[in-house]
Image: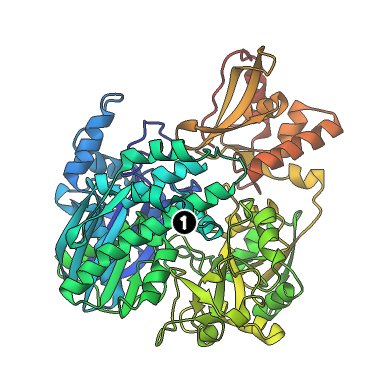
Amino acid sequence: MLCLGICGGLDRIHESSPELPNTFLHDGAAVLVQDGRVIAAVEEERLNRVKHSNKFPSNAMRYCLSAAGVELHQIDRIAFYATEAYCNTMLERLAVSQPLPLDAKLLLRQLLAREFGTEVDASRVSFVNHHEAHAVSAFAMSGFEQSLIFSVDGGGDFLSGLLAVGSGTGMTQLARFPESNSLGLFYLETIRYLGYGLFDEYKVMGLAPYGDPTPYRELFGQLYELLDNGDYRVHLDRIGPALLRNIQVRRKGMPFTQQHRDVSASLQEALERIVFHVLLHYRETTGITRLCLAGGVAHNCTVNGKLLYSGLFEDIFVQPAAHDAGCALGAALMMSSELGRPTPRERLSDVYWGPGLGNEQAVEQELNAWSGHLDIQRCDDIAASAADWMADGAVIGWVQGRSEFGPRALGNRSILADPRPPENKDRINAMVKKREGYRPFAPSVLEENANEFFELPDGKQAFPFMNFVVRVREAQRKVLGAITHVDGTARLQTVSRKTNPAYWDVINAFKKRTGIPVLLNTSFNNNAEPIVDSVADAITTFLTTDLDGLVAGPFLVKKRAARLQDWGALSVSLPPYASLHRVRSYTAADRQETVCEIRTGPSGRDSIRISHELFELLMRIEGEAPLGWLLDTTMADHDKREDIVKELRLAWEQRCVRLRPPRAAFDCNKRKSEAQAERTNDPGNACVAGPG
């Protein structure tokens, strides 16, 4: 039996329809399960390159079908990650501003027909409860015969969580938590006053250890109540007034004060108190000693670590894709079980379910296409060479095998470095991630050596998914200066030779070189994009950051000093989520001027300003066009060309344009005639260019 679970939006990436509430549509993904076992899974953002994509996951679905060698009509059941009634309610809210079918199943079937060219019978389309999908995604993968299950997030299906007992292949609900008591929204509403928003929660978790919860403990005590029988209440309406009266609100980009750090610490403490209150009650009343966690709040690795050390449970399993993308997994597993093919009771060991790099020839061909920009060397012992690079101070991109499912880079799409020099943390935050300097990096350690460097509970050795913050052994904290957080902890990943031999080999090679069986590991992306997936993605990120080297398959890659003609050999296009606009704007002197922008993000909310010259160049593109030809047709001055290429590279760095080697023959005469026609357009009008 083949079951496909999907989550995400009910519109396509090139459609600009109004957005549904973010509690419902984000983190699109597809997961294909055969007889209860995962064959393929990927988040849509990895393929359409839009972070937290809220669009229909058509690319992710195509990948899953391709990986299994099947077509959509061969899928036995397709399951969406929310109930039909909830989806219909969301569609009714949208219908005020846009005509839409108010039948979610009909709309989903129409989307499938448009994207895949085949009609899908209504009997093969199912909708599942959002939090049940979260819960099943954790329990079915835990290997437990029985456990408590806690699903907790911002909201979905009019709930913010549920608590249940999983037993065998069944699940019995014990409690449901309404959206009015959402711990996810409690966290989110608070961090808005710290200059953060949706999807930034983990940043505040990293900031909390720099603060002291004491100054605001009493204040936060007024924002929630711990009730009898493991119940609780949060007062979302009190958060804004309380913080406005007591702190200086931080706006995005402003420096952090100690006040902001202390609020972060108080928020984290409040979350921990509520979670422990709920779980302690159900642990005592049921006597069940194992726990499964899912939902976005389950990505709070600090809470998970404290649960781990508390001894409240003998074993804890956190679903690695605990956020909404994991609901695609739960939905597929629910359907498989319903069709008589439940998931085998085995502990999940890895999540390398995404697209692979292709064979060595394909990797080499992709790299060689960038020959004007890259120096490429094949290496028989890639692990040793990469370890030598890092031991000598290099920070490298590391791309191997199939990509990981979920938000963590687990050694196949990673940035790696020596974990010892404390300055490596600041260096990587500044040169690659372009993010706040306080944010920590994770260690990857050989599983067999983990206990030598980290304080692990008795009998626990495998932590393969970066789901727990653990204590670094005091004697090792100065040794591991780049991955030890200010409070002496680290978000740990243990690496097994069995599940990822290539990654194990490079860590082991670093151990042979330095005596340290640990690497600094962070996701391979910059601040403007999701984690890389393909070799092409990796090259783009490598060339638009200050990484020292790239390892892709068996190839060592360094940068070359590219000439203007090398840049001219590339093709340029707009990504599907970007559009060009020429608008009237007020200057600081309160005068109006015409400005040019590239708009990206949901509904074009994000934008960068560009010069009129670059705007005119980009307006000549339909699909994609060689940069050299565009320069030839727009400007003769060599220095001006250098300036335009520099500006274009900055836009590329922010993922507002695409640069890549040409993929197909280009009809120059056709483009010249089109460019001539473009010049007759009225430049005073607001201009919009569609996707490339």
Given residues 235 and 547, the one toward you in this image is: 235
Q: Which residue is mark 1?
A: 214
Q: Position of residue 667 (x, y in %)?
A: 64, 35
In the image, residue 78 above or below residue 653: below
Q: Position of residue 50 (x, y in %)?
A: 49, 46
Left or right of 63 in this view: 622: right
Circle 1 packing at 10 Å, graded few (<14), some (14-19), many (20+), is: few
Quadrant for the N terminus in the image = bottom left
Left or right of 402 in this view: 12: left
- Give the number of callouts: 1
Q: Position of residue 250 (x, y in %)?
A: 54, 39
Given residues 60 and 417, the one toward you in this image is: 417
Quick check: can you spot residue 61?
no
Quadrant for the C terminus in the image = top right
What amino acid type should be assigned to the residue bearing mark 1? Thr
Given residues 103 and 72, the one toward you in this image is: 103
Residue 477 sits in quarter: bottom right
Q: Residue at x 66, y 13 (%)?
A: 590
Given residues 131 and 459, the one toward you in this image is: 459
**Disc 1 secondary structure class:** helix
Left or right of 247 in this view: 286: left
Left or right of 368 in this view: 155: left
In the image, residue 90 above or below residue 149: above
Q: Position of residue 562 (x, y in %)?
A: 79, 51
